[in-house]
Image (spheres, rainbow, N blue to C red):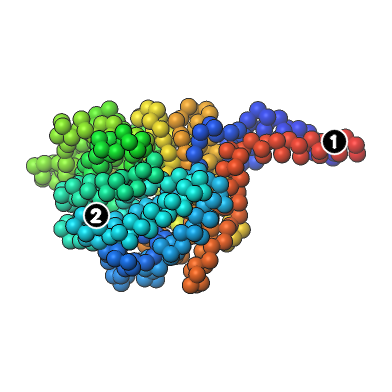
């Protein structure tokens, strides 16, 4: 009895020392540290936390309009009050400081600064709020990472067509310049757009997100075309006018699931590749790729399908040669939001009504063995993180990658074991990607700092490291186990000390057993 236990312990001990596989799980786990300059962060976004939707001169955004329309969100929830972060800078910064992270990723509400979206009227009270937040962060040694667009477009700009209207390239550029000018002396990291594919597909394709338009065959492509141009334009504004003095970096945060081929067959492997290119490559190829253009496979498939539908042109807009030259390399870092994976097989869609989903000729499913979260789309697949990072390196080279979001939902218990497990394994796969695949990952951001307004799911879904009591007018925040666990990883910059602790524990037990 004693012998076999000892043998087991020694085995575990050895496998840990050799960075070996945790044999109790199908998942691989390694011990080790992240590079010394690796950055840890935590994220939120304006509409999801600020509240104060019509205070101090803020203009309405498309999400105010959308959530105030009956039937758009679960239980009619909205962000009118949310976490009341507009009045809680002190509490928020305190929480972030407790995590020990190096940066806080938050977003600026465009209509809080520019109520009608344009420079016609600058709302100084909105500027004052972000100044106070940035200064409070810096006084705690926390760097701000600022997202300019996390989906809350000024309603006034939707009234002229939203991202269908190319003049938004200029309006966005004006807004970005204002932010660089007013905040850039203290901000080193800028993200232009958060997950633009969610905007294009959910907002303009199937209409489940604001502005709620349903044009699945053309909307997403048109909206994306403007968004990419807006990103590129703002990138050069920063380069020319601000970078020499401010020395910051500008990137874009794209989101992608990992797409695992359903089989080894050539068609399924191609289908999985196509699915990633339609989602991630759609934005990343023009900016980080060699061509400055959309992926060839998108041009081919959308062109082919448009033709079969009797169109004389492709539903995918095209970039001019000059656009392509501008697009290429228009980012200082690669922002990645990653949550989950899918199994992809080839599935030919007969040409019927045009649809971005059908254009891909793929079928996405979940492996029934994957661990669930409380959201249908979010299955826990830690190794997908590593494979996706590897894919990004293979396609876009050594551009610095910041994981700008990753996290998991539940119904909100403080003892959130599942969230601890999620971060333990997802972050570990980032470590593996760095150590074993040479991926140039520079930072990790946990989504989210605290529970918040989860878009169409309202307040039913909890992503927070901190619990928020939404029945309390004070919106009291309380750390979950995952907050403590994440702080530990941040503090250790990986999993080093745990190895030492584990070693000590093994030695102690081994010693005791010998005594017996
Ligand atoms: C991020 O999106 C967002 O940036 C963040 O604001 C959000 O709170 C967080 O994730 C958690 O959701 O409705 O079935 O069509 C994550 C990527 C892409 C996930 C769109 C949900 C819609 C699935 N999201 N997707 S579905």
The quarter in which the C terminus is drawn is top right
Count residues near mark 1 (Cα–Cα under 10 Å), then give few for <14, some for 14-19, many for 20+: few
Does residue 35 appear in the picture of this structure?
yes
Q: Toward the viewer: 58 or 451?
A: 58
For image coordinates 8% across by 42% down, the residue present is: 312
Q: Which mark is residue 39?
A: none
Ligand 1 closer than 8 Å to the CB at disc 1? no
Q: Measure the C-alpha gap from mark 2 to mark 1.
A: 65 Å
For image coordinates 10% across by 45% down, the residue present is: 310
Residue under numbered circle 2: 204
SS at circle 2 = helix
The quarter in which the N terminus is drawn is top right
Count residues near mark 2 (Cα–Cα under 10 Å), then give few for <14, some for 14-19, many for 20+: many
The mark that comes first in sequence, 2 or 1, is: 2
**Where is residue 195 drawn, in percent x and y?**
34, 47
Is residue 190 depicted above or below 113 in this figure?
Answer: above
SS at circle 1 = helix
Left or right: 429, with 196 as reference point: right
Does residue 458 appear in the picture of this structure?
no
Tell me, yes or no, whether the two marked residues, 2 and 1, touch with CB atoms within 8 Å: no
**Where is residue 147 drawn, in percent x and y?**
36, 48
**Where is residue 78 drawn, in percent x and y?**
37, 67
Left or right: 117, with 363 as reference point: left
Q: Quadrant of residue 319?
A: top left
Is residue 370 depicted above or below 122 in this figure?
Answer: above
Ligand 1 closer than 8 Å to the CB at disc 2? no
Q: Which mark is residue 511?
A: 1
For image coordinates 54% across by 51% down, the residue present is: 97
**Where is residue 64 drawn, in percent x and y?**
30, 65
For image coordinates 85% across by 35% down, the residue present is: 511
């Amino acid at each position: 009895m004693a012998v076999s236990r000892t043998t087991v312990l020694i085995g575990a001990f050895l496998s840990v020392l050799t960075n070996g596989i945790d044999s109790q799980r199908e998942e691989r786990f390694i011990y080790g540290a992240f590079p010394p300059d690796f950055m840890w962060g935590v994220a939120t976004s304006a509409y999801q936390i600020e509240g104060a939707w019509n205070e101090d001169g803020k203009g309405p955004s498309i999400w105010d309009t959308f959530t105030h329309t009956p039937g758009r969100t679960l239980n009619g929830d909205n962000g009118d009050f949310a976490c009341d972060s507009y009045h809680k800078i002190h509490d928020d910064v305190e929480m972030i400081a407790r995590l020990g992270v190096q940066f806080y990723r938050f977003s600026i509400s465009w209509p809080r600064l520019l109520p009608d979206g344009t420079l016609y009227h600058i709302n100084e009270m909105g500027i004052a709020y972000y100044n106070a937040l940035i200064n409070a962060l810096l006084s705690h040694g926390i760097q701000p990472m600022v997202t300019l667009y996390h989906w809350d477009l000024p309603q006034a700009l939707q009234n002229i067509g939203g991202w269908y209207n190319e003049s938004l390239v200029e309006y966005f550029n004006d807004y970005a310049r204002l932010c660089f000018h007013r905040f850039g002396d203290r901000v080193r990291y800028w993200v232009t757009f958060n997950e633009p594919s969610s905007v294009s597909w959910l907002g303009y394709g199937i209409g489940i997100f604001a502005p709620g338009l349903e044009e699945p065959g053309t909307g997403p492509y048109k909206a994306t075309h403007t968004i990419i141009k807006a990103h590129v334009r703002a990138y050069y504004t920063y380069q020319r006018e601000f970078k020499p003095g401010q020395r910051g970096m500008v990137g874009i945060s794209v989101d992608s699931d990992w797409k695992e081929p359903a089989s080894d067959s050539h068609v399924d492997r191609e289908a999985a590749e196509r699915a990633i290119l339609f989602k991630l490559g759609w934005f990343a190829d023009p900016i980080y790729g060699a061509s400055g253009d959309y992926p060839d496979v998108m041009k081919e498939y959308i062109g082919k399908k448009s033709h079969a539908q009797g169109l004389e042109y492709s539903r995918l807009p095209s970039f001019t040669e000059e656009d392509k030259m501008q697009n290429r390399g228009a980012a200082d870092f690669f922002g990645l939001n990653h949550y989950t994976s899918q199994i992809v097989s080839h599935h030919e869609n007969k040409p019927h009504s045009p649809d971005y989903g059908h254009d891909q000729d793929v079928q996405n499913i979940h492996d029934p063995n994957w661990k669930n979260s409380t959201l249908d789309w979010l299955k826990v697949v830690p190794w997908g993180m590593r494979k996706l990072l590897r894919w990004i390196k293979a396609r876009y080279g050594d551009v610095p990658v910041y994981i700008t979001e990753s996290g998991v939902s539940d119904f909100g218990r403080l003892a959130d074991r599942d969230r601890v497990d999620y971060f333990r394994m997802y972050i570990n796969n980032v470590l593996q990607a760095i150590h074993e695949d040479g991926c140039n990952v520079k930072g990790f951001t946990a989504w989210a700092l605290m529970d918040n307004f989860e878009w169409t799911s309202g307040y039913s879904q909890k992503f927070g490291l901190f619990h928020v009591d939404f029945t309390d007018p004070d919106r009291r925040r309380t750390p979950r186990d995952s907050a403590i666990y994440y702080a530990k990883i941040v503090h250790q910059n990986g999993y080093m000390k745990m190895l030492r602790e584990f070693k000590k524990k093994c030695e102690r037990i081994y010693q005791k057993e010998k005594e017996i």
